[in-house]
Image: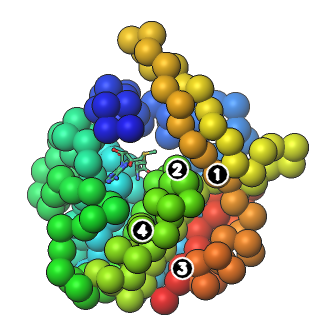
């Protein structure tokens, strides 16, 4: 997956922007969802799998972004030159226990298969007492989990695992509460 995201990094944000074209209300809804997250009490936050920093910039408090892709981190640093970004593996975090007050993660938890989810949740809970997860809401007729065959601009194709979420089911899975449940996005907070 590291190579997939390294290759995709220069145009990754096209997805955030482009999806709005055929998904009514997408751009407005992500603003709403992030406004909800931004209104949480300021906290020392680790944004795990921060990508280009598209959402990192809205997180309240002192924020560190972590990603395993050097190309993604380069984009994040370009976007937020004053930001703190570190390379690292979300499944083996380079931080000691309790280093943060909150973990935020967007469009990462949804890509983890079951054994990775278990490792991720153990790591997240080890370094912070609070976890906020953002992902896609399950649409009607859509498979709740699937392997997608994703093309990149260079013609390469990549198998990517993806889950989409029922808000209450994700809240139950994470032992948390639903912060946002719209047409396109779900945000759950577990503290
Ligand atoms: C779909 S992107 C989401 C990026 C960003 N959070 C967002 O919502 O725009 C997934 C990100 O996870 C990162 N990633 C994948 N596996 C990782 C791992 N094991 N440790 C850290 N980052 C990882 C990728 O490099 C990529 O930046």
Does any atom of ligand 1 lie closer than 8 Å to the CB of label 4?
no
The answer to whether 153 appears left or right of 72 in the picture is: right
Q: CA distance from mark 2 to mark 3?
A: 18 Å
Q: Are marks 4 and 1 in contact (CB under 8 Å)?
A: no
- Where residue 18 appears, as percent x and y from the top left, is 55, 31
In this figure, which residue is indicated by the disc labeled 4? 119
Mark pair 4, 1: CA separation: 17 Å
Residue drawn where x is 78% and y is 45% of the image: 143
Residue 83 numbered mark, or none: none
Disc 1 residue crowd, few under 14, some 14–19, many 20+, Cα 10 Å:
many
Label 3 crowd bin: few (<14), some (14–19), many (20+), radius 10 Å: many
Say which element carries label 4: helix
Query: Under tag 2, what secondary structure?
Result: helix
Q: Which residue is mark 3?
A: 189
Q: Are marks 2 and 3 in contact (CB under 8 Å)?
A: no
Label 2 lies in ligand 1 vicinity (Cβ under 8 Å): yes
Looking at the rendering, which quadrant does residue 69 occupy?
top left
Q: Nearer the viewer, mark 2 or mark 3?
A: 2
Asked whether disc 4 touches disc 3, contact meaning CB atoms under 8 Å apart, the reply is no
The N terminus lies in quadrant = top left
């Amino acid at each position: 997956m590291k190579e997939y995201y390294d290759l995709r990094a220069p145009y990754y944000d096209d997805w955030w922007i482009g999806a709005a074209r055929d998904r009514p209300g997408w751009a407005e809804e992500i603003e709403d969802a992030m406004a909800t997250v931004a209104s949480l009490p300021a906290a020392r936050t680790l944004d795990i799998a921060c990508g280009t920093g598209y959402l990192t910039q809205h997180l309240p408090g002192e924020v560190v972004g972590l990603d395993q892709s050097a190309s993604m981190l380069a984009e994040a640093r370009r976007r937020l030159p004053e930001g703190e970004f570190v390379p690292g593996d979300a499944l083996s975090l380079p931080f000691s226990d309790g280093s943060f007050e909150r973990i935020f993660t967007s469009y990462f938890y949804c890509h983890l298969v079951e054994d990775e989810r278990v490792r991720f949740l153990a790591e997240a809970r080890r370094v912070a007492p609070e976890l906020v997860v953002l992902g896609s809401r399950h649409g009607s007729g859509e498979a709740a989990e699937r392997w997608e065959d994703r093309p990149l601009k260079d013609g390469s194709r990549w198998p990517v695992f993806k889950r989409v979420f029922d808000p209450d089911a994700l809240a139950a899975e994470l032992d948390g509460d639903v912060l946002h449940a719209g047409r396109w996005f779900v945000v759950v907070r577990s503290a």
